[in-house]
């Protein structure tokens, strides 16, 4: 009788320990298996320039979501980026997204403008977010500047 | 006989109208935009015979067929749009359109003729397209992309322009947001009106 009680409490202890490990892994990984508190929106970019899955999505610098899986559309050769945005952010049809950099060589992040609700005009965002600004190609700009200077008369 | 004459005229008139309309409708959005842009450049470089005010009026008339300035301005103001009352909304739409026309006519009419190459049209989604162009102006090559939406009763209309990948709507929205942090809508109208006055006095 006594040994069964000990066995039970050891089992319970191990179980609680395992649950704690799982909880910790989910929290540290930033995954959201448990809560359905995000909305998924696919944004199309012609160049994501180093944006990675897990990067931040911000409004006015405040984090409101994370970047999900990124895929290449083989037909259009454009990047389809899944944005996981907090449910309390309402998106309208004039929403825009831009890829920006923290400082000159910092991490890439998505700066989101959720759009404006104007009575009788605005509609909630439907489908993919296509009004985007891609990462600025600094090398391309420099080479174009150099090319321009060569052709100067 | 007397009765058929006016109706024949009406029929001919309608036939001409619909023929003209279908000819316009057959042009692709890229061809329509290309025609408008080259027309604007022609007006700006039509010499000094036409007074500047008249040129501006002609440019505005030409651009309004392809550019929805009201939509561009509403998007530029973003959330600040709702802070304006109706009369202010109307006034700001007129003032910003006026300022845009005056700024660009002043810049483009004085220099050499810009060379615009229309490169391609790309579908963004079922109702939006992007027209890629490159502009050679004063020895610099700049990429200018027009974003158009198919709007009911207006056809394909430009709602944003990207210069080197940077949207003018987002760029101006940032500046207007900064203004509204410390100042009111009425002050914004005053700032724009005084800028227009500067162009008028030149």
Image (cartoon, rainbow, N blue to C red):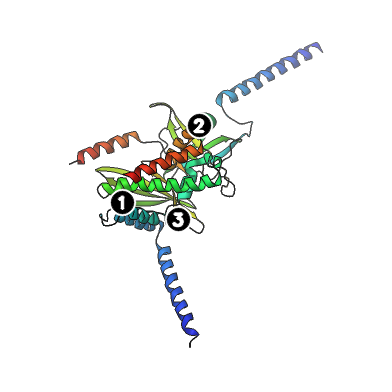
Furthest toward the top, the residue is A2
Location of residue A91 in the rendering, given as x and y in whole percent from the top left corner = 56, 41
Residue marked by disc 2: B181
Q: Chain of mark 1?
A: B
- Dot 1 alpha-carbon crowd within 10 angstroms: few under 14, some 14 to 19, many 20 or more: some
Residue marked by disc 3: B156
Furthest toward the bottom, the residue is B1
Which numbered disc, 2 or 1, marks the residue that appears first in the sequence? 1
Assign the N terminus of chain A to one quadrant of the image.
top right
User: CA gap, disc 2 to disc 1?
Assistant: 40 Å
Could you say whether the residue bearing mark 2 is in a helix, strand or loop? helix
Could you say whether the residue bearing mark 3 is in a helix, strand or loop? strand
Nearest the viewer among B157 and A103 is: B157
Above or below, B90 against A144 in this view is below
User: CA gap, disc 3 to disc 1?
Assistant: 20 Å
Badge number at residue B117: 1
Q: Chain of mark 2?
A: B
Location of residue A80 in the rendering, given as x and y in whole percent from the top left corner = 47, 41
Q: Chain of mark 3?
A: B
Residue sitting at x 34%, y 44%: B199
């Amino acid at each position: 009788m006594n040994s069964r009680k000990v066995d039970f409490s050891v089992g319970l202890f191990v179980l609680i320990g395992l649950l704690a490990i799982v909880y910790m892994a989910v929290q540290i990984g930033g995954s959201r298996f448990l809560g359905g508190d995000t909305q998924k929106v696919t944004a199309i970019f012609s160049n994501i320039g180093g944006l990675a899955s897990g990067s931040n999505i911000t409004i006015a610098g405040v984090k409101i979501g994370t970047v999900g899986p990124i895929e290449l559309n083989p037909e259009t050769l454009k990047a389809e980026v899944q944005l996981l945005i907090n449910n309390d952010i309402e998106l309208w049809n004039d929403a825009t997204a831009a890829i920006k950099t923290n400082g000159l060589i910092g991490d890439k992040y998505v700066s989101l403008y959720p759009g404006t609700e104007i009575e009788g005009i605005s509609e909630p965002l439907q489908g993919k977010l296509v009004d985007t600004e891609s990462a600025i190609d600094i090398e391309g700009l420099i080479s174009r500047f150099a090319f321009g200077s060569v052709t100067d008369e | 006989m007397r009765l058929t004459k006016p109706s024949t005229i009406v029929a001919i008139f309608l036939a001409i109208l619909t023929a003209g309309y279908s000819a316009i409708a057959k042009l692709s959005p890229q061809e329509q935009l290309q025609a408008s842009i080259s027309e604007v450049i022609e007006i700006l470089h039509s010499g000094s015979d036409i007074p500047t005010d008249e040129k501006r009026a002609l440019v505005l008339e030409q651009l309004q067929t392809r550019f929805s300035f009201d939509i561009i301005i509403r998007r530029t103001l973003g959330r600040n749009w709702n802070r304006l009352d109706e009369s202010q909304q109307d006034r700001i739409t007129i003032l910003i359109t006026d300022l845009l026309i005056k700024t660009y006519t002043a810049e483009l009419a004085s220099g050499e003729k810009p060379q615009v190459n229309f490169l391609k049209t790309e579908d963004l989604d079922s109702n939006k397209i992007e027209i890629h162009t490159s502009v050679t102006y004063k020895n610099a090559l700049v990429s200018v992309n027009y974003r158009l939406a198919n709007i009911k009763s207006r056809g394909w209309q430009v709602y944003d322009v990207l210069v080197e990948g940077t949207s003018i709507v987002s760029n101006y929205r940032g500046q207007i947001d900064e203004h509204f942090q410390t100042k009111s809508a009425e002050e914004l109208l005053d700032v724009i009106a005084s800028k227009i006055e500067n162009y008028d006095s030149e």
